[in-house]
Image: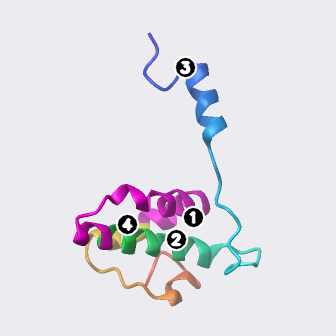
């Protein structure tokens, strides 16, 4: 028996429901680096605010889907490492040049 989520029907459903990030007029240029960065920050801000208020964190999932759609996985991994080690400094300068260093 195939593992859950690996059947042809499961894959078709995932592809059908998959969505990419919608157009954001704040970032009209071809490069979506700042859009990626902003949605990453917005997700964490939303998550922090909802946790502090005792609200439902699931409302923040839209931001996560957008940044996961736009950002290369290596950037997200580097940002997550810094976020988890408390050396994360949300600065727009970090999206210029080498994203692996701050």
Please identify, in this view, whether the residue under mark 2 or under mark 1 is nearer the observer: 2
SS state under label 1 = loop
The residue range painted magenta reads: 49-77
Q: Is residue 55 magenta?
A: yes
* Callout 4–callout 2 Cβ contact below 8 Å: no
* Callout 2–callout 1 Cβ contact below 8 Å: yes
- The image shows residue 67, relative to residue 90, as above or below, that is above
Q: Which numbered disc flags the more N-terminal residue, 4 or 1?
A: 1
> Seen in the image, is 19 located left or right of residue 60?
right
- Would you name the residue on which mark 1 appears? 71
- Would you name the residue on which mark 4 appears? 80
Pick the front one: 87 or 10: 10
Name the residue rendered at 64%, 36% in the picture: 15
Quarter of the image with the N terminus in it: top left
For marks 4 and 1, give the CA distance.
12 Å
- Would you name the residue on which mark 2 appears? 39
């Amino acid at each position: 028996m195939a593992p859950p989520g690996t059947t042809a029907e499961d894959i078709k459903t995932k592809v059908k429901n998959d969505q990419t990030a919608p157009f954001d007029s704040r970032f009209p240029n071809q490069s979506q680096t700042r859009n990626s960065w902003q949605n990453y920050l917005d997700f964490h801000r939303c998550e922090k605010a909802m946790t502090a208020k005792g609200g439902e964190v699931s409302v923040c999932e839209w931001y996560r889907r957008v940044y996961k759609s736009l950002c290369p996985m290596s950037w997200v991994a580097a940002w997550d490492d810094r976020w988890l080690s408390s050396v994360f400094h949300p600065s727009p300068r970090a999206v210029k040049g080498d994203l692996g260093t701050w």
